[in-house]
Image (tube, coloured by chain):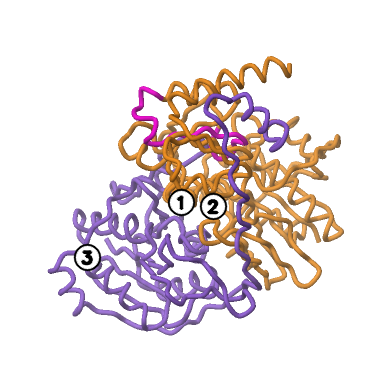
């Protein structure tokens, strides 16, 4: 028996969401008294894979077939299941990031393994095998018991505080046996913003709503995000009128995020918006309207005009940064 | 083009969430149910737009008891050709996906379009599960879908942007915002929906998971209000008290 985790890299670095999933797999393996093994497909930097030892991975199986770099959910599923079978894995851990959402349900079917979609805690193994997840857009949690011997856990990003040690994983060349005919997805083009912090991976997020009054005022949000190393986000109305691109939209119909800190400037906090951000550890709300529902979900509130408050917050943060360095 | 659109019913976004039977069941009393937004607004409407252009049919399929036929009739009023109801309450995603697969496997659908997730259990599972059962390609978090030369051209989310991919038909697509705009059924649609075909089939699917209990999310403690002129204090609290910076 073992626990296996699927690892992805982006621009030669193992994704932060994959490192979290690896840590989760290692902790689950400890609970089950076994080892955690990783499966990596396509192009990866070997030194990066070795570093998975730091979060408790003993061995990385690597199929370096570059065809895997084209994200084909069917081929990747076959490969993950082949690796799981070869190491006799009972638990498969996959980050529920954009790619994981496509793969984990497929792996569940292929292994006939019960799946928890969006786990937010380690499994309880005292009676049965139960994993907690958020339901009703974060308004409640469900404890989901997996009834099958094989299990798939799709982990919500930013869930566990990881403990990092200093160990090196061994890397083993592995052939998943996936044939060329299994690849049917062709990537035509990629539109990607580089050099900024990815929203779904971000620990700090600065977000703006209609209270920002216009796209020309976003400089203050970008400056604060830049100073803090945060990602930028926005509310739905702002994305709908094209003040900001849709890939920044958080909320029920946009992204669900769980950063450590979410700063909402000029966002009233409609229930649909809260559904996307209520998993944030700490929420700061800046709004002129003291009756804005967002204050009820906030940890810290500032009753004022975001256009006036944000520059002051930027100055205060700069002062804090220079004092702490 | 033959398209299948699985539709789900969910509690309205503003519904009060509570549980009964020792926190093992969702309390449905006084809860208004709606068609799952991403199924209705994006998956169904895009399916209709595709058959309006290419010709073909859109079948909606729903798993639920007889009282959920009102949601199926709404989908028919919006424009679906016909409908199927799997006569059982949904237990887990695998069971629902398996039932949809059992119905669809010998019907030669070119496309299955689902919403990206339901707003109750937030799983994003059904589409991927159906795709694997059928052993066909799958793209999720899709914000654009066009059919060109018998292939699906799909825009999907990746970290920090989008990727345009081409996959052969048949395939499964899970749709999100950007795919289409909500359509309100008109009187002609509502009248026509009454006579459209609705087939009822039995459930054969099995569940692989069960919810042993629910808990409400912990309430936030009162928000600490700070003066707009004292952002140094906010930064201090974020550092020393909340420890997030």
Give whichever of A78, A215 is nearer the camera: A215
Classed neighbour count for the residue bearing mark 2: other residues with Cα under 10 Å, few (<14), some (14–19), many (≥20): many
**Residue B112 x %, y %:** 38, 61
Is label 3 on the same chain as label 1? Answer: yes
Asked if marks 2 and 1 touch (Cβ < 8 Å), the reply is yes
**Residue B164 x %, y %:** 40, 39
The residue furthest left is: B188
Disc 2 from disc 3: Cα separation: 29 Å
Helix, strand or loop at label 3? It is loop
Residue B162 lies in what quarter of the image?
Answer: top left
The magenta span reads A198-217
Disc 3 from disc 1: Cα separation: 24 Å
Residue that badge 1 annotates: B140
* Chain coloured purple in the rendered structure: B
Asked if marks 3 and 1 touch (Cβ < 8 Å), the reply is no
The residue at 73%/32% (across/down) is B240
Q: Which chain carries label 1?
A: B
Residue that badge 2 annotates: A101
Residue A229 part of the magenta-drawn span: no
The residue at 30%/76% (across/down) is B70
> Which color was chain A given?
orange
Residue B8 lies in what quarter of the image?
Answer: bottom left
> Disc 3 or 1, which lies upstream in sequence?
3
The residue at 73%/47% (across/down) is A38
Q: Which chain carries label 2?
A: A
Q: Is residue B163 visible to us here?
A: no
Give whichever of B139, B152 is nearer the camera: B139
Residue A149 lies in what quarter of the image?
Answer: bottom right
Give whichever of A19, B236 is nearer the camera: B236
Q: Which mark is residue B79?
A: 3
Disc 2 from disc 1: Cα separation: 7 Å
């Amino acid at each position: 028996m073992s626990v296996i985790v699927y690892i992805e890299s982006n621009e030669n670095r193992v994704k932060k969401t994959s490192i979290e999933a690896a840590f989760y797999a290692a902790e689950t393996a400890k609970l089950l008294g076994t080892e955690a093994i990783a499966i990596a497909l396509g192009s990866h930097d070997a030194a990066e894979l070795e570093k998975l030892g730091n979060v408790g991975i003993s061995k990385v199986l690597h199929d370096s077939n570059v065809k895997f770099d084209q994200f084909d959910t069917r081929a990747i599923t076959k490969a993950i299941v082949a690796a799981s079978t070869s190491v006799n894995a009972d638990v498969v851990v996959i980050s529920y990031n954009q790619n994981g959402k496509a793969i984990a349900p497929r792996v569940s079917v292929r292994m006939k393994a019960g799946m928890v979609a969006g786990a937010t805690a380690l499994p309880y193994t005292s009676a049965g095998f139960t994993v907690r997840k958020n339901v009703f857009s974060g308004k409640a949690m469900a404890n989901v018991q997996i009834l099958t011997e094989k299990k798939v856990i799709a982990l919500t990003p930013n869930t566990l505080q990881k403990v990092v040690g200093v160990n090196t994983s061994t890397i083993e060349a592995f052939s998943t046996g996936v044939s060329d005919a299994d690849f049917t997805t062709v990537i035509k083009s990629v539109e990607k913003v580089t050099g900024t912090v990815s929203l779904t991976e971000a620990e700090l997020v600065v977000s703006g709503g209609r209270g920002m009054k216009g796209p020309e005022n976003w400089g203050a949000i970008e400056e604060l995000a830049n100073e803090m190393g945060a990602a930028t986000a926005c509310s739905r109305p702002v994305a709908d009128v094209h003040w900001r691109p849709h890939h920044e939209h958080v909320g029920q119909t946009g992204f669900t995020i769980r950063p450590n800190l979410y700063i909402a400037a000029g966002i009233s906090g409609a229930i649909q918006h809260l559904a996307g951000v209520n998993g944030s550890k700490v929420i700061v709300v800046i709004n002129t309207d003291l009756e804005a529902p967002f204050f009820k979900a906030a940890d810290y509130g500032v009753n004022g005009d975001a256009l006036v408050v944000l520059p002051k917050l930027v100055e205060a943060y700069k002062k804090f940064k220079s004092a702490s360095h | 083009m033959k398209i299948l659109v699985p539709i789900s019913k969910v509690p309205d976004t503003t519904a009060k969430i509570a549980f009964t039977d020792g926190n093992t069941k969702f309390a449905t009393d006084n809860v208004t149910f709606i068609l799952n937004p991403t199924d209705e607004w994006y998956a169904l409407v895009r399916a209709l737009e595709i058959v309006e252009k290419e010709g073909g049919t859109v079948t909606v399929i729903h798993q639920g008891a007889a009282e959920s036929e009102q949601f199926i009739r709404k989908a028919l009023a919006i424009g679906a050709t016909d409908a199927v109801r799997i006569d059982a309450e949904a237990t887990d995603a695998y069971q629902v996906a398996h039932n949809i697969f059992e119905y669809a496997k010998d019907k030669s659908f070119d496309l299955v379009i689902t919403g990206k997730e339901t707003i109750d259990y937030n799983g994003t599972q059904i589409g991927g599960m159906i795709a694997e059962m059928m052993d066909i390609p799958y793209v999720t978090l899709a914000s654009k879908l066009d059919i060109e030369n018998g292939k699906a051209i799909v825009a999907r989310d990746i970290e920090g942007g989008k990727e345009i991919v081409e996959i052969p038909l048949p395939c499964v697509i899970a749709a999100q915002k950007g795919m289409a705009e909500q359509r309100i059924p008109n009187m002609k649609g509502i009248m026509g929906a009454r006579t459209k075909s609705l087939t009822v089939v039995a459930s054969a699917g099995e569940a692989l998971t069960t919810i042993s209990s629910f808990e409400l999310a912990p309430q936030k403690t009162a928000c600490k209000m700070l003066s707009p002129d004292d952002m140094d204090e906010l930064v201090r609290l974020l550092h020393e008290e909340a420890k997030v910076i």
